[in-house]
Image (tube, helix red, strand yellow):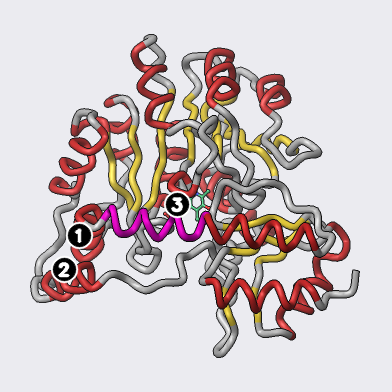
Amino acid sequence: MSVRTRADLAALPGYVPGRSIPGAIKLASNEVSLGPLPSVVDAIAQAATQINRYPDTGSGELVARLARKLAVNGDEVAVGCGSVTLCQQLIQATCTADDEVMFGWRSFEAYPILTHVVGAAQARVPLTDDHFLDLDAMLAAITPKTRLIYFCNPNNPTGTAHPRAAIERFIEAVPSDVLIVIDEAYGEFVDDPEVPDGMDVAKAAWAAGRDNVAVLRTFSKAYGLAGLRVGYLVAPAAVIAAVNKVYVPFAVNAIAQVAAMASLDAEDELLARCRDIVGERGRVRAALIELGYDVPESQANFVWLPLGERTAAFNEHCLGQKVIVRAFAGEGARVTIGTPEENDVFLAAAGSFPR
Ligand code: PMP
């Protein structure tokens, strides 16, 4: 007799990570191309001498640091093993089998997988024709079962971001017992002044007595720590308490905690890198449009090419030119902004794709 595992998992698509191929340029995972700062590597090396000890399971020092930086209380911050783990904890903390998680689609690939694994239902609301979350359709799709809404701003993979007024209107229209999580994995790459800092939106909502808004962020992208797995959630204390209940003990390792703090120390330098990436994003988008591609304006460290049925061919063509992009067959390709040299190789590949 073989072991009986959950039958429903057979039909569950696994999370597809961006591919890595030796010698190829990887523009598939929205990482930053430049390596870690020497000060961060030094902090990691120092922390490595203590790894015979368990980490601080509550990431106390990092939580306190983040709380100070964001001007919130320590009990309004939770740290997780990458923000993706906090996504899972949020679902576990809000949903049982009778409940539903809502998100735009397409959005971050892990939302539906995690929702299924937790055992909740999902409401995927198609994006608008111009690749934005369809906020009106999302509002219309809310039911008494809805417990959690992922509002990915900027949205992965389309890069589109909503302005403050639209987000505030949305928040006001959502029932106050439904948690809205503004996922700002790419927030540091926003340069449109109309697009708000989610913390400002959350604080305004809290001040107005709405305790159903949270902000999710990560050290993986702008802070260059994708390999160490650390992200954080800022939310009203009751939400943080629930999220911490479903935390797997010691999930955030000691080196990640130290590296996150060293990255906060080096924030100015890291955010300057983000500004360079934003500059490159503008250059890449303009060049693609010049080549005849449709490219929605992106506020993230990637661009979206809605190539529809030509996506698979584009992906193969780029691979042939040793550039790895992230293709969603039948929909489009997401391309991370790399160094100027990497972007040039990608643009050459895009230029030689038969159109
Ligand atoms: N949210 C969004 C929108 C993302 O794109 C990602 C990573 N692809 C994450 C969360 C998770 O990132 P991490 O677990 O590395 O913090």
Query: Does residue 141 show up magenta in the picture?
Result: no
- Amino acid type, label 3: Val
Q: In the drawing, does residue 148 fall left or right of residue 297?
A: left
Nearer to us: label 3 or label 2: 2
Q: Decide: marks 1, 2 in contact (CB < 8 A)? A: yes
Would you call the spot at circle 3 few (<14 residues within 10 Å), some (14-19), or many (20 or more)?
many
Task: Give the residue pinned by disc 3.
Answer: 84
Would you call the spot at circle 2 few (<14 residues within 10 Å), some (14-19), or many (20 or more)?
some
Q: Nearer the viewer, residue 22 or 191?
A: 191
Residue that appears at 16% across and 41% down: 64
Q: Nearer the viewer, residue 347 or 63?
A: 347
Residue that appears at 62% across and 37% down: 103
- Amino acid type, label 2: Ala
The secondary structure that dominates the magenta segment is helix
Is the CB–ligand 1 distance for label 3 below 8 Å?
yes
Residue that appears at 10% across and 67% down: 53
The tag on residue 262 is 1
**Magenta-highlighted residues:** 267-278
Give the distance between the C-alpha atoms of the residues marked 1 and 2, in whole angstroms. 7 Å
Query: Does residue 276 show up magenta in the picture?
Result: yes
Query: Looking at the image, can residue 1 be seen?
Result: no
85 over 142 or under it: above or below: below
Q: Decide: marks 1, 3 in contact (CB < 8 A)? A: no
Residue extending farthest to the right is: 355
Give the distance between the C-alpha atoms of the residues marked 1 and 3, in whole angstroms. 22 Å
Residue 18 horizontal/vertical position (percent): 58, 70
Give the distance between the C-alpha atoms of the residues marked 3 and 2, in whole angstroms. 24 Å
Looking at the rendered structure, the secondary structure element under dot 3 is helix
